[in-house]
Amino acid sequence: MSALVMPDAASAPAAGSNRTTLGEHVLGQLLRLAPIAGLADADTRTYGQVLMDSLTDTAHRPLTLPPASLSYISDDHTPVEFSLALTPDAAPTLRMLVEPGCASGDMAESGRAGLKVIREMADRWNFSTAQLDAVEDLFFPDAAEGPMALWYALDLRPGGVPGVKVYLNPSADGPENAARTVREALQRLGHPDAFAALPDAAGYPFIALDLGSWATPRARVYVKHPRMSADDAVTVSRTAPGLAEDQVRSFFRLATGSAPLPGRKAGESPRLLRRPALTCHAFTDRETASPSGFTLHIPVRDYVRDDEEALTRATALLSHFGMDASALRRALAALTPRELTDGVGLIAYLALAHQQHQQPRVTVYLSSEAYAVRPPPSLPQRETSAP
């Protein structure tokens, strides 16, 4: 491991120049984002070193070359994504999502690379990997399938010790076995009746585990929902008490732009016809099968004309939930100098999260755009279909 030399904003290569590498691009973004979350230079240096170590040789790959692999963290295959989690009257939390095995030749090799990185983190920050060890054979078969093997996310906390989250692929042993894998994993993790509490699903893209320093570690199951409507959104949460129905409806309509339109019949609830919504169900209490947390994820990039419209929607919903959008605007400027009207996808997802005994949280997922900017469509990305 080499010591990290933090780039100077004035001397770092401009994004897209022939000299820019993937590592320089994402590290520069991290450096500019960190002050928004109140991170000290020493914290940023620690997290930057972990990021660069995770990317291994890929960090030194010029952006003039195509991505080392088709990482599905982002639409342009950048293996890094950032996000801001916001609550009322608190500084935002900065997160980064990374695919540590992005340069591997296949999913089995990618999984091994990812496990190595997580165990190095466990040594660095002195936490147990027992939860991950308990399900390792389910998610890392010799002939692993699927678009990913292991991703990790870090909640970048002041003090240099993050919250660590690991994302695993339930379809690693084949998509036809995903439900069985989720059920078995929940049983091993101490939640034997949890699978029955999940809503109907068109697929299970991830299971996520909290490792390290968490007050209440969670096992989380992500569920895919094609053609979701606001009416559907209020029925899929299984937490009790959960988000109020009007909160879910307001979030869905503000995030998707599906407010009632002239000519629509009363009671008609428009559906998401492009990329599907996701829900996340968090389990913490081994004495009950009910989830203790619920998150609704809307892929806003598929339902807007450009990122300016996405920012307008994000600003409206943050205001609705009593949150300040200024940190988001600063984050967008930290990621890229481009005009928001020149692309779509810089703001990838908007999410509303509720954990029992905590305030609702809005998370905005931000693309690095290391390799490409998705151009705006010729027509507005609006859904208008009623059931």
Image (spheres, grey):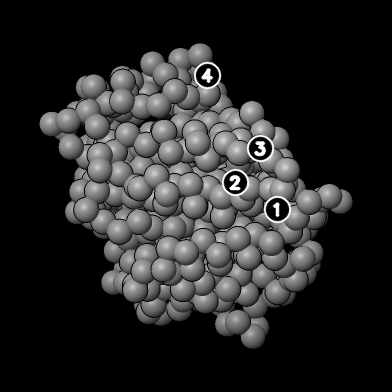
Where is residue 221 drawn, in percent x and y? 38, 34
How many numbered marks, from 0 up?
4
Comparing labels 3 and 4, the label whose residue is closer to the camera? 3
- The residue that mark 3 highlights is 265
Q: Quadrant of residue 194?
A: top left
Instruction: Tell me if residue 58 can be seen.
Output: no
Sequence order check, earlier mark of 1 and 3 = 3
Q: Amino acid at mark 2?
A: Pro
Sequence order check, earlier mark of 3 and 4 = 4
Horizontal placement of 69 versus 34: left or right?
right
Say above or below: 378 vs 32: above
- The residue that mark 2 highlights is 299
- The residue that mark 4 highlights is 175
Q: Amino acid at mark 4?
A: Pro
Residue contact at pointers 4 and 1, CB within 8 angstroms: no
- The residue that mark 1 highlights is 304
Q: Quadrant of the N terminus?
A: bottom left
Residue contact at pointers 3 and 4, CB within 8 angstroms: no
Horizontal placement of 104 versus 127: left or right?
right
